[in-house]
Amino acid sequence: MAEIIVKSTASVEVKVVLVLTEEEARALYNITVYGTKTFLGWFYRNLGKAYLQQHEKGFISLFDTIGKELPKHFKRADEARSVFNKLQ
């Protein structure tokens, strides 16, 4: 009789939706302008590595996502505000 091997895997994926005010989003974006190397260097020197180092890959991805995604939303908000102000 042939040997039958059955394998299975399971995974859990968590996605978090974070709702920010425009002011909070702009503040978060401006933190990322320093870049991950500069920010992490300062953070590790001044606050230590205990909490953030284990999540460094996620931190870098977070900064990248913020840098790519938020500016287009700021542009739309600024353009809408400009149009609205012209109507007054």
Image: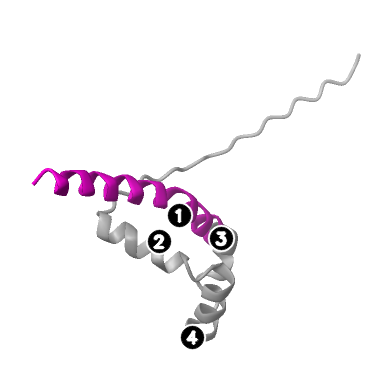
Estimate how packed mark 1 is, as few (under 14), some (14 to 19) or many (20 or more) residues with alpha carbons within 10 Å: some
Q: Position of residue 46 (x, y in %)?
A: 49, 85
Q: Earlier in the sequence, mark 3 or mark 4?
A: 4
> x, y percentage for residue 38?
55, 75
- The answer to which of marks 1 and 2 sits earlier in the sequence is 2
Q: Residue at x 16, y 44 (%)?
A: 84
Circle 2 crowding by C-alpha within 10 Å: few under 14, some 14–19, many from 20: some
Question: Mark 3 or mark 2, which is nearer the start of the sequence?
Answer: 2
Q: CA distance from mark 3 to mark 1?
A: 10 Å
**Amino acid type, label 3:** Ile
| Left or right: 47 as drawn, with respect to 56 | left
Pair 2/3: label in front:
2
Q: Report the residue that reaches farthest toward the left.
A: 88
Q: Position of residue 57 (x, y in %)?
A: 60, 59
Query: Under tag 3, what secondary structure?
Result: helix
| Magenta highlight range | 59-88
Per the image, the residue denoted by label 2 is: 29
Looking at the picture, which amino acid does disc 4 mark?
Answer: Asn
Q: Which residue is mark 1?
A: 66
Closer mark to the observer between disc 4 and disc 1: 1
Residue 73, magenta (yes or no): yes
- Tell me which numbered mark, 2 or 4, is placed earlier along the sequence: 2
**Residue closer to the observer: 40 or 67:** 67
- Closer to viewer: mark 2 or mark 4: 2
Residue extending farthest to the top is 1
Would you name the residue on which mark 4 appears? 46
**Which of the marked residues, 3 or 1, is nearer the chain's N terminus?**
3
Q: Is residue 69 visible?
A: yes
